[in-house]
């Protein structure tokens, strides 16, 4: 083949996106149910979502939502923890209970022929957990062991240090979602049980089911399963959002002598999920660090060879959450990589992105939409986000138009608001002896060095 | 469930095997290429080379300028990636259905015209990226250097599976453009690859397109075969490593039959019974009842020339490795002597069935339909094997699981303990 003689093929127009048909029902108990039927494979995903998560944990009780979620399947009125695990696994199903910042999810995945039995267990876990003392002690001590492990993982250590520095000691986001040794040590099973009682009501939850189900037949079955669940008003689980600390040190080095790489986390508090800037920030982030061909990945990986990869994201929680650039670079490149990231983050608000970059990012997002609705798990997750954040019926149907409406000006405008280079916190987990001098010469901010572990 | 993935198959004159699978569930199409080369084919002094070469495949080709491969795909709404294993290297694109020809064109261009694009600068840049991958995934990660220690203990010098896919820093540093040229000529030819196109396609039209894009790629020379005598250990090999960790961890690994060979499915079931899920034997005894373990895992890690059966148990901070090992030995002896219960067999079968059917939800990516078709093509010589694959687990009996565990897991193993620095006391009773 002779080089440089052929151009890429011309492509026909895109096939229209097909989004799942969604039906909503309100059960007698008040539980909102969202159903998306799909019959191509005998697979079902169901997610029971409580509208309460770790954002409601004041730092002193960090880990409360995390442990409460883990306790849901550790004993119920009808099952011991071991019996429940045996039942669900013998169905070939998975049932996972976990807390996020804004929600607590009981996620079921099962083949359709075994759905009925699995749904009974899901309802049992959602409605009738018993919080046995011994299971609580086991969960808590497992978590404390895991925390001791995390101190030796540079990536986890960097993320925790970043969150604490950006949000400070009084904001829920400043503490790890899974808690600290101190917060967990003072947590009692009664605290967790009371927390669960306050939030566990039909009016503070919703159920999403996607896959090979008959919606008409399913609703009466769900009426039976969730019959009698109280629809009390949602308890106020919010911790009262303190302002982000903001005034913390600009550059923090966590010393790991001899480390071959530095883990970098650079960012600042970002906007809530329902910000009007959502779409400009989504497109802008794709250009900055949200895709393989984004500015940071091309610069730090492909051009400079500093890293295996670099990326950025907005957490977009209900109450905000950070914007964060993450990468791991070889030790000698640390200060130069920090310099590049700070410059590129700031440039987003200072100068308009090129039309070529804008076009590529918009096309990557809009033409890539079908990939995000491929599996029943994808569909359940997407529909759950709409319900949790109140994005409104028709959100996904209007999504492509919203992305296409983003302009270079709206990206610059939103970036100037949220990506302020003077407000960035820089965390470096690496070999302080090698990196501190160069970091001080950068002049990004005062450099503070801490021991790890 | 009688699951089948109907395929149309043909072979181009240059030797490229092509597999087409119509799957109109979503307006997506998956392109998936397996080159039948991996770290098993590397020469001494060039460990890590198959993977380094994989990185070069994204750096442009005869008609694709540097940087354009990913840019063209992303602006078409596609995602793409690749991976290298001991046995094979795979590449995939997942695209909106209308953009199929772009991926076919890009794959054909780099199959037939990679070398014109590879300069010393591109090689150096990807060498740096791969060295950083090694630092990030292995050197700067707790327990990260265990895998290469295990391999060196399992396989004798010269065995194709002895070196880790990531390779050594010294060998990565030594790789040069002649190596790239030689590897490309030897292994990256149409006759050493298989192409799957799956998704919302019209097989007739795609067949014509594949012939158009790939038909002009020159056939390569015959590929040198790789073989190895079955690996075995004549005695337990015991190793203790100190690492920058806070939790002790026990690794036990045995040689086991190749992927899809007799005994492979039974060992999958044994892995589930031992350590998959909270109903498994080791989870119950070590994590739940005695609370000396934090997590347990077991895996029959299937491969072409012979597999390994791996158990990994992370202890609590003061857990003695000997206690973990004794529990594993007890569980294995019990299964070897008494088999497993009917309920354990049902649980493992149902879990495996769910996992396999679940993997068919995605048409592309790692482990989706297209990748699975190529996997069966490579290991079984025929793509539509998912039904036969699942039938292996239906045919397995509780007694057969016991017999296979008896035959393979009472044999010598590599027993590797990792302890926190300064805590070699946790390895007492774990003779070196």
Image: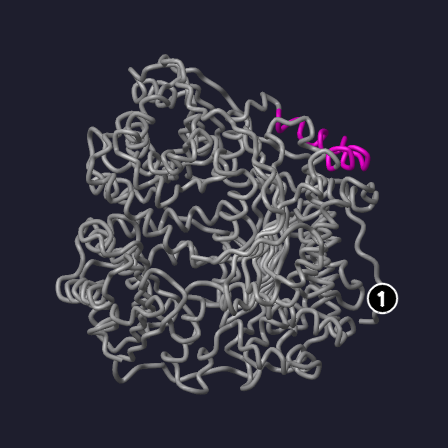
User: Which image quarter: residue A393?
Assistant: top right
Spot occupied by residue B65 in the image (x, y as percentages of width and height): 80, 63
- Residue at point 37% right, 80% down? B153
Q: Can I make out residue B394 in this image? A: no
- Residue at point 68% right, 66% down? A305
In this rendering, is residue A129 above or below A182? above
Residue A401 inside the magenta-drawn segment: yes
In this rendering, is residue B160 above or below B203? below
Report how many numbered discs are placed on residues in the image: 1
Q: Quadrant of the C terminus of chain A?
A: bottom left
In this rendering, is residue B411 above or below B370? below
Determine the secondary structure under disc 1: loop
Spot occupied by residue A33 in the image (x, y as percentages of width and height): 44, 22
Spot occupied by residue A170 in the image (x, y as percentages of width and height): 48, 33
Residue hosting label 1: A4
Residues in magenta, as a range:
A395-415
Q: Out of B399 and B49, give the one closest to the viewer.
A: B49
Spot occupied by residue B8 in the image (x, y as percentages of width and height): 57, 56
Q: Can I make out residue B205 in this image? A: yes
Q: Out of B236 and B348, give the one closest to the viewer.
A: B236
* Chain bearing mark 1: A
């Amino acid at each position: 083949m002779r080089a440089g003689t052929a151009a890429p093929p011309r492509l026909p127009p895109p096939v229209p996106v097909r989004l799942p048909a969604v039906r909503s029902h309100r059960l007698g108990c008040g539980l909102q149910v969202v159903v998306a039927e799909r019959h191509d494979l005998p697979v079902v995903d169901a997610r029971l979502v409580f509208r309460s998560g770790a954002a409601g944990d004041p730092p002193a009780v960090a880990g409360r939502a995390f442990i409460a979620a883990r306790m849901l399947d550790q004993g119920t009125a009808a099952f011991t923890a071991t019996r429940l695990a045996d039942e669900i696994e013998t169905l070939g199903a998975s049932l996972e209970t976990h807390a996020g910042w804004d929600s607590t999810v009981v996620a079921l995945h099962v083949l359709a022929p075994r759905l009925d039995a699995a749904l009974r267990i899901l309802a049992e876990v959602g409605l009738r957990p018993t919080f046995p003392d011994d299971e609580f002690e086991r969960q808590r001590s497992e978590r404390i062991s895991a925390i001791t492990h995390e101190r030796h993982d540079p990536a986890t250590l960097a993320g925790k240090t970043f969150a604490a520095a950006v949000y400070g000691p009084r904001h829920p986001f400043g503490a790890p979602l899974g808690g600290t040794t101190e917060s967990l040590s003072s947590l009692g099973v009664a605290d967790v049980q009371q927390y669960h009682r306050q939030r566990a009501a039909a009016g503070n939850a919703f159920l999403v089911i996607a896959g090979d189900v008959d919606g008409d037949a399913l609703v009466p079955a769900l009426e039976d399963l969730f019959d009698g669940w109280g629809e009390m008003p949602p308890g106020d689980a919010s911790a009262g959002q303190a302002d982000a600390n903001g005034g913390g040190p600009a550059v923090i080095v966590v010393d790991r002598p001899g480390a071959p790489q530095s883990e970098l986390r650079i960012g600042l508090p970002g906007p809530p999920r329902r910000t009007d800037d959502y779409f400009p920030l989504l497109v802008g982030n794709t250009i900055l660090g949200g895709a393989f061909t984004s500015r940071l990945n091309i610069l730090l990986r492909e051009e400079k060879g500093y890293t295996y990869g670099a990326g950025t994201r907005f957490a977009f929680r209900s109450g905000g959450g950070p914007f964060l650039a993450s990468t791991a670079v070889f030790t000698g490149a640390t200060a130069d990589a920090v310099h590049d990231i700070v410059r590129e983050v700031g440039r987003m608000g200072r100068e308009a992105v090129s039309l070529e970059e804008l076009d590529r990012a918009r096309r990557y997002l809009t033409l890539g939409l079908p990939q995000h609705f491929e599996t029943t798990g994808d569909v359940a997750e997407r529909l759950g986000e709409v319900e949790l954040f109140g994005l409104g019926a028709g959100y996904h149907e209007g999504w492509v138009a919203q992305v296409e409406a983003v302009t270079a000006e709206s990206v610059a405008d939103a970036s100037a608001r949220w990506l302020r280079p003077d407000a960035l916190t820089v965390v470096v987990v690496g070999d302080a002896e090698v990196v501190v001098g160069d970091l001080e010469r950068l002049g990004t901010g005062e450099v503070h060095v801490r021991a790890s572990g | 469930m009688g699951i089948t993935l109907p395929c149309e198959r043909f072979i181009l004159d240059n030797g490229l095997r092509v597999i087409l699978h119509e799957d109109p569930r979503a307006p997506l199409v998956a392109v998936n290429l397996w080159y039948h080369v991996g770290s098993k084919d590397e020469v001494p002094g060039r460990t890590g080379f198959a993977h380094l070469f994989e990185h070069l495949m994204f750096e442009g080709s005869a008609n694709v300028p540097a940087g354009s491969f990913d840019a063209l795909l992303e602006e078409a709404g596609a995602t793409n990636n690749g991976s290298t294993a001991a046995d094979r290297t795979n590449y995939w694109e997942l695209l909106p259905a209308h953009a199929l020809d772009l991926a076919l064109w890009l794959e054909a261009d780099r199959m037939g015209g990679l070398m014109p694009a590879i300069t010393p600068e591109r090689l150096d840049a990807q060498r740096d990226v791969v060295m950083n991958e090694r630092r990030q995934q292995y050197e700067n990660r707790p327990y990260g250097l265990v895998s290469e220690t295990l391999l060196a203990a399992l396989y004798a010098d010269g065995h194709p599976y002895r070196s880790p896919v990531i390779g050594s820093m010294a060998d990565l540093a030594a790789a040069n453009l002649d190596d790239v040229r030689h590897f490309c000529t030897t292994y990256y030819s149409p006759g050493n690859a298989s192409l799957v196109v799956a998704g919302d396609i019209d097989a007739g039209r795609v067949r014509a397109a594949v012939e158009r894009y790939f038909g002009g790629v020159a056939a390569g020379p015959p590929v040198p075969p790789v073989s190895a005598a079955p690996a075995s250990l004549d005695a337990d090999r015991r190793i203790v490593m100190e690492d920058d960790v806070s939790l002790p961890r026990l690794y036990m690994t045995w040689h086991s039959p190749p992927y899809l060979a007799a005994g492979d499915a039974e060992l999958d079931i044994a892995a589930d019974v031992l350590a998959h899920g909270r109903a498994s034997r080791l989870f119950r005894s070590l994590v739940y009842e005695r609370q000396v373990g934090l997590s347990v895992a077991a895996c029959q890690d299937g491969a072409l020339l012979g597999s390994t059966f791996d158990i990994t148990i992370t202890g609590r901070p003061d857990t003695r490795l000997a206690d973990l090992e004794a529990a594993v030995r007890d569980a294995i002896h019990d299964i070897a002597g008494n088999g497993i219960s009917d309920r354990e067999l049902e649980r493992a079968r149902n879990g495996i069935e769910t996992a396999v059917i679940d993997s068919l939800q995605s048409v592309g990516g790692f482990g989706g339909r297209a990748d699975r078709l190529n996997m069966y093509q490579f290991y079984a010589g025929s793509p539509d094997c998912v039904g036969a694959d699942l039938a292996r687990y239906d045919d397995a009996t509780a007694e057969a699981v016991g017999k296979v565990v008896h035959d393979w897991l009472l044999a010598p193993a590599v027993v590797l303990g990792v302890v926190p620095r300064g805590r070699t006391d946790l390895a007492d009773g774990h003779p070196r």
